[in-house]
Amino acid sequence: MKSNTFNYSLLAVGVAAVMGVSTGANAATPATAVTAGAAPINNVATASYSIAGVSQPSVTSNTVTVNVSETANFALTSTVDDGSIGDDTAINQTATPGGTTTFTHNLTNTGNVTDTYTINTTGNDSALVTAAPDYPLGTAPVTFTIVQADGTPLTDAQVTALGTQAQTGTLTNGGTIRLQPGTRANLSYEAATPDDRNGNDKGVGTLTATSTFFTANNAPGATLVNENQTIVRLPTFKIVKTATSTVDLTVANPQIAYSIVVTNATTDYSAAATDIVIRDVLPVGLSLPNGTASDVTVTGGAGTATISTVGTRQAINVAVANLAVGASRTITFTVNVDRDQFTAANSSVTNNAEVYDKFVGPVSPLPATPVLGTDYDILDSTDGTIGVTRVPDDAGEGNGAGIDSPGVTSFTRRAVAVSNPTTREVPPASGTASQATHSTLITNSGQDGEGTNTNPLTFTIADGGNNGAVRPVTGPVSATYTPPGNGAPVTITLQPTVAGGNTYTLNSTTLPTAQFPNGIAPGGTLEINYNVSSGNVAAPATVADAAAVGSTETSVVTLTPAGINAPAATTVTDTTNVRGLTLVKSQALDATCSGTVAASTFIQTAVEAKPDQCVIYRIQATNTSSAALGFNLNALTISDLLSNFSAGADLVAGSPATSATASSTAGIASTTSTAVLGTNYTLVPQGVGTLTFKIKIKNAR
């Protein structure tokens, strides 16, 4: 923008050349007035007379001379209030593309002679205001009204003296006007700004007046120049649109809350915005709850909302009659979300807002597809690819006054849970080799990656607390990931968050991105395998060191999602049953000592026997583990001490025998000096190994 280097005030200069005096000027006036000598007026008188009727010679008087001095001067001053009035510049006058700007000036005859002036408008850039303009102002006709120098109407005598000079009228460019001394012409013209100019563009032109008197006398300063300057002022819209950042699509009625704040930003070239329309065309999948203007609230000033359609989409249109520089309007509304439109992983929606304005006149109700030049001249949008802002580019960049931002919402449909409760069996003392392994399944049935830094998961494996001799094994666990679509499984080892602990975190670190590029991807599963041990020592010497056969324990696996819109924690309860060997001893009376008794006659209660009768003992060892989950019992030895019965009975020689159910292996029957034995049985799950032998009641005890 040119600076006003010289700010003149009007001081008409009239210099009497005959006095040889020159005075400096600080207004749009010539440096000196021009005085030209007119033809002198010489006056001689004559007299004639007679004496006594006789004519005498005529008498001529002396000559007297009047020397006429004509002094010409004039002033051309701007009457535009640009911070100062009466100088030779008019700066920073508002212009609009394709419009005109009015400039007014006074041309005053400050001399003592009537003069004629040639008036021109130009697109020139004079030296009055520094720096280059962006465009030249257009030339135009100049209207005029002649009044007295002080602005009062002409006197009757002055009107008469006008002669052929009109008192008011319009001069074409280069036309002339004649002014009497002490009168002035109020001049006005409309300078055009081209259609293609933008905000902050500056135009320059001049209004000139050339004195005929000065020109005829070849005097300097015959042409006075006033510079006129425009600046294109347009609204600079700043659109800030905010939205609910994330929406959980698993809720009953997912919604997004929107706020649009439109500000007419303050810049050196700002102008009030009148009769604009703010529009929001809702993306596919979003809709107003009622589909009416009642869904929309406008604050910060007046604004009228209407609802239209653009194809199948709803459009919110808010008409604002006036948005002053620095003022804002805030538009708020809530929309329903059609979850079926956002099923892809990491789905989101970007909702833009637009402001439409015209250089002249109101923006009419917008059609579905507004047309530039017909429906609008200015379009500002949070979609930076379609804006026609007509303001400098830097206004919408970086920290520019007109920076815009859209509303972006990310959708989550998180559905991750643990499942697959299992039942396993352990022996009374498992050691490490016979621990039970439970497999808990983490399934991602949502549409977001799980087990990432954004959506971390934590799971714990807790002891049920029902059986002190059975517990989950703490420390590392094995995890097998099966990608969606039955991809190739990946097995890793997960370490607890605390060494020896039972809490584990799944994130982008514990699930390496090389193997888990999206954590547990939608449709993927992660199988957690953990062990349960029994017994207090590796090789229990007593029953107290082992878990009781037939006892049970539970362990609880809890999965707790974290992050945005995390679903609720889920649990599974696994069961561990203690299985092993049961030993049942029964007896049957063999009164004749024949060795043959029915199986049904064996009882665990007392029998009545007489001397010389026999009793058959049956000892049955049973593997209580189940066929589906169990384990073999190996190197089984059944022993019955002779001392248990030797005081009242004798072992019948050759009677010890062994047997086993199908798929099991019977032991070898033998007798030592101290016991009856069945050695080296192998019992499959649910298998039974039997040792029988016969004793004979002593006759003399």
Image: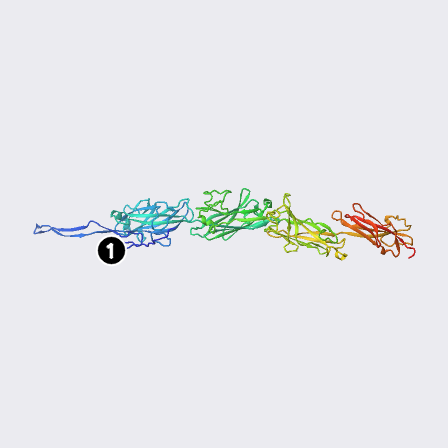
Amino acid type at circle 1 is Val
One can see residue 294 in this view: no
Residue annotated with mark 1: 21
Could you tell me if residue 145 is visible in this image?
yes
Q: Is residue 107 left or right of residue 692?
A: left
Instruction: State the quadrant of the C terminus.
Output: bottom right
Q: Residue furthest front?
A: 673
- Determine whether, in the image, residue 468 is placed left or right of residue 143: right
Tell me how many marks there are: 1
The x and y percentages for residue 542 are 77, 57
Residue nearer the viewer, 700 or 496: 700
Of 543 and 482, nearer the camera is 543
The answer to whether residue 678 is left or right of residue 400 is: right
Q: Which SS class for mark 1?
A: loop
Disc 1 residue crowd, few under 14, some 14–19, many 20+, Cα 10 Å = few
Q: In the rendering, at what x and y percent does residue 440 appear? A: 68, 49
Query: Would you say 380 lies left or right of 211 here?
Result: right
Q: Which scheme is used to colour this image of the protein?
A: rainbow
522 and 283: which one is in front? 522
Give the x, y percent position of residue 188. 35, 48
Instruction: Give 144 or 408, whichever is nearer the viewer.
Output: 408
x and y, in percent, of residue 12 in the image:
29, 54
